[in-house]
Amino acid sequence: QAPRPAGPITAPLLPGSGKVLLVNNLNQERVTCDCLFKLFGTCGDVMRVKILFHKRNMALIEFRDSSHAAQAKTHLNNCALFNSNINIMVSKMNEVPMPPADSQESYEGLTQDYSSSPLHRFKLGASSRNANNITFPNQSLHINNIPDGATQEQLVAVFAMFGQLEL
């Protein structure tokens, strides 16, 4: 019998189980790291975003853990973003590296670290109430904290500037 390795035994990383996603078919004229952070942050805590320097229609998104990445892939694959349906696959990378501080990539802001962002919604992991409320993107908008005296006409006036409303 072969000797057992010292230290904890870990399962091998199965294909499709990583915490870094590769996103392609991005609108390279409009997409930014902040935009991707906010979109993918609806499904899990995003640690880093990197728009590829030579392929700006592609990005790497690193999540806190693989369950967050799996949620994002499930809910956002083929989602429309700036008139392009994005494609998502699990990357072979284990993390998104930061570029050297003096590089052109760093200067252009193509890689951002969000690991200490106060905007993370899933700090408690699977026990977070937000983790139970992830849904596919749709055209419905849920709003709360509306003042008690607000009327439907006032709300329509505020939101109509963003597009046609269905009540």
Image (spheres, rainbow, N blue to C red):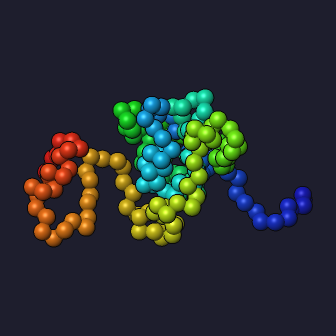
Work out which quarter of the rendered image holds the N terminus and state it: bottom right
In this rendering, does residue 16 appear at all?
no
Name the image quarter holding residue 93. top right
Tell me: residue 107, above or below residue 146: above
Tell me: residue 48, above or below residue 9: above
In this rendering, does residue 48 appear at all?
yes
Is residue 14 or residue 71 the one in the foreground? Answer: 71
Name the image quarter holding residue 154. bottom left
Tally of marks: 0
The image shows residue 96 at horizontal and vertical percentages of: 64, 47
Q: Residue furthest top?
A: 54
Residue drawn at 51 percent across, 34 percent down: 24
Tell me: residue 100, above or below residue 158: above
Horizontally, residue 48 falls left or right of residue 31, namely right
The image shows residue 33 at horizontal and vertical percentages of: 51, 44
The image shows residue 60 at horizontal and vertical percentages of: 57, 42
Is residue 17 or residue 42 the one in the foreground? Answer: 42
Horizontally, residue 117 falls left or right of residue 85, namely right
Residue drawn at 63 percent across, 37 percent down: 105
Residue drawn at 47 percent across, 31 percent down: 28
Is residue 157 or residue 141 the one in the foreground? Answer: 157
Residue drawn at 57 percent across, 29 percent down: 55
